[in-house]
Image (spheres, grey):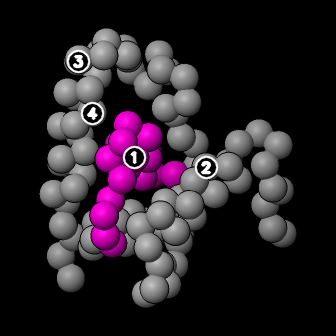
Amino acid sequence: MQSDDRFAKWAAAFLRTVGADSGAGAGQGDAAVPGLRYEGITPAAGDLLRSVDAGGIPAFVTGNLRQIASDNGIEVDPGWTPNEILAAIRAKVRDAEPGGPAPEP
C-alpha cells in the first residue's frame, strides 16, 4: 500500500499560513514556540502533532497516519480512530519526557 501524504502536505501549508498570520513562531523555529517540540518520535510524527495542535485534526485514518504510527513503533488496531492513534503518539512523547517511565529491561 502506498502512503498518502496529502494530509501532511495540507498540514504543512496550514501551519505556514497560521504562523505567518499570527506571527507565533514564524521563521523562529520550534524552540521559539513553547510546547511545539516533541521528543521521542519521528519528525513526521512531530509535524503531525504540530498540525493537530494548530487545529488540523484528521477526520479518518489514512495510510499516512498508519505509516507514521508504525514508524514510531505503534501497532494500530484496525478499529482505532484518528484520535486513538494520536493519543498513542502523544504517549510516546510523554514516555520520552524527563521523569517518564523507565525503559523496560
- Up the image or down, 64 lies above or below 28; here it is below
In the rendered structure, the answer to whether residue 102 lies left or right of residue 93 reads: right
In the rendered structure, the answer to whether residue 36 lies left or right of residue 96 reads: left
- Up the image or down, 25 lies above or below 5; here it is above
Q: Residue 24, how many percent across, how many down?
A: 37, 16
Q: Secondary structure at mark 4?
A: helix
Q: Secondary structure at mark 2?
A: helix
Foreground mark, 1 or 2? 1
Mark linked to residue 52 = 1
Q: Which residue is mark 4?
A: 15
Q: Secondary structure at mark 1?
A: helix
Foreground mark, 3 or 2? 3
Identify residue type, mark 1: Val
Residue under the point 63% across and 57% down? 91
Q: Secondary structure at mark 3?
A: helix
Mark linked to residue 93 = 2
Camera-nearest residue between 60 and 37: 60
Q: CA distance from mark 3 to mark 2?
A: 27 Å
Foreground mark, 2 or 4? 4
Q: CA distance from mark 1 to mark 2?
A: 15 Å
Q: CA distance from mark 3 to mark 4?
A: 8 Å
